[in-house]
Image (cartoon, helix red, strand yellow):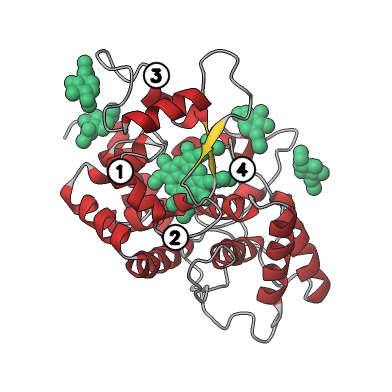
Amino acid sequence: MAFNPALLSSIFIVLSVFSAVTNALSLNYYDKSCPNVEQIVSNAVKKGKANDRTVPAALLRMHFHDCFIRGCDASVLLNSTSGNKAEKDGPPNISLHAFYVIDNAKKQVEASCPGVVSCADILAFAARDAVVQSGGPNWAVPKGRKDGRTSKASESVQLPGPTFNISQLQLSFFQRGLSLNDLVALSGGHTLGFAHCSSFQNRIYNFNATRDVDPTLRPSFAASLRNTCPIKNRPRNAGATMDSSSTIFDNTYFQLILQGKSLFSSDQALVSIPQTKGLVTKFASSNQAFSDAFVKSMIKMSNLNGGQEIRKDCRVVN
Ligand code: HEM
Ligand SMILES: *[C@@H]1O[C@H](CO)[C@@H](O)[C@H](O)[C@H]1NC(C)=O
Ligand SMILES: *[C@@H]1O[C@H](CO)[C@@H](O)[C@H](O)[C@H]1NC(C)=O
Ligand SMILES: *[C@@H]1O[C@H](CO)[C@@H](O)[C@H](O)[C@H]1NC(C)=O
Ligand SMILES: *[C@@H]1O[C@H](CO)[C@@H](O)[C@H](O)[C@H]1NC(C)=O
């Protein structure tokens, strides 16, 4: 067989992710050692959201980024140091924010049960709370993750990008043990939050050699995006909300895909093959079906683990 570096490296990623799943998680992990931990985290998220309504979206995305690089080990929370540029300072970090909410939660958890709860678990709880507090489904989060000691900016390129097509998305999820069903359900996270123009620019200018605008975009929607994102004198933070109810966790995102009003090529890609298109259609017509699938896939994604310690400060290794 010919030497294929791309194949070898994807096999390596699969092996390293799976071999990292060493700690079996459980629902009662902190029952004795920190019984109030989930209440403390939920209050910290509530307080964060009251100050800034973009906090839930930020926390949900932060957990996704964490899990997709080295497993859910709080690698996304680590600060850069003099010798190392951390994951959060790598390229696709454009909307990562609200790290202080996790810091506040950790501080309060440490005051109540020092040295017991990992930052990775706190982030997993916070992502669930973000969904619940936005009107989405609730679920019991398996716990017992450990925090990792490595975070590299160079690894953030392993995240899927907004210009990915369906085969690239499928591979990215497959490498982490996640299926096409998980891809569609978890993409529903795009019911919350905001995207900068740079994330969907490819669809509204110079789409390809013959088309300026992606023809799968509804023309009126494309026109409004171009208006929001002018080429010249574009405001630095210009962009669009992910869906028309961007602080409410619901199935609107899937309805908008079917109307040609999704933001990213990677969102539109979900209707490019029958299997995923069928799920988009199902979730668009049933919020319950979406919620059930989202919960299942979130638990699967957030079970990827990789760490070895309980960090004292979520931004620095012990
Ligand atoms: C399927 C592959 C995915 C791609 C290519 C992708 C890409 C992106 C991009 C480019 C942004 C906008 C960044 C910006 O311009 O500011 C974004 C935002 C967001 N993503 Fe994803 N994402 C994916 C999957 C997910 C998953 C699995 C979740 C969670 C379950 C998620 C949750 C979010 C949220 C909540 C935001 C809004 C963040 C905010 O407003 O602060 N994404 N995503
Ligand atoms: C981590 O970085 C943030 C932002 O640059 C800074 O405010 C904070 O003090 C740093 N924390 C630690 C523990 O280094
Ligand atoms: C994102 O990464 C860039 C460099 O790639 C860095 O300058 C910037 O501070 C990072 N932003 C955040 C919010 O971490
Ligand atoms: C997706 O993109 C990759 C890389 O550009 C390309 O090789 C592949 O053929 C594309 N697949 C589809 C289904 O368009
Ligand atoms: C541009 O995109 C359209 C729509 O996807 C496609 O039909 C056309 O073949 C593409 N043109 C080129 C030159 O790739």
Kind of element beneath mark 4: loop
Q: Type of residue at label 1?
A: Gln
Q: Which residue is mark 4?
A: 96
Distance from label 4 to label 3 (Cα)?
25 Å
Classify residue 87 as left or right of residue 108: left
Which mark identifies residue 259?
1
Q: Which residue is mark 3?
A: 205
Rendered-image quadrant of the N terminus:
top left
Residue at the limit of the structure toward the front, as seen here: 220
Q: Which residue is mark 2?
A: 250
Q: Nearer the viewer, mark 4 or mark 3?
A: 3
Viewer can see residue 68 = no
Q: Type of residue at label 3?
A: Tyr
Distance from label 4 to label 1 (Cα)?
28 Å
Distance from label 1 to label 3 (Cα)?
20 Å
Crowd around label 4: few <14 · some 14–19 · many ≥20 (10 Å): some
Q: Are marks 4 and 1 in contact (CB under 8 Å)?
A: no
Labels 2 and 1: the sequence-earlier one: 2
Crowd around label 2: few <14 · some 14–19 · many ≥20 (10 Å): many
**Does the Cβ of the disc 2 residue fall within 8 Å of ligand 1?**
no
Image quadrant of ligand 5 equals: top left
Distance from label 4 to label 2 (Cα)?
22 Å
Q: Quadrant of residue 3?
A: top left
Labels 4 and 2: the sequence-earlier one: 4
Distance from label 2 to label 3 (Cα)?
30 Å
At 64% across and 85% down in the image, what residue appears? 31
**Does the Cβ of the disc 4 residue fall within 8 Å of ligand 3?**
yes
Which mark identifies residue 222?
none
Kind of element beneath mark 1: loop
Of residues 283 and 172, the one nearer the viewer is: 283
Distance from label 2 to label 1 (Cα)?
16 Å
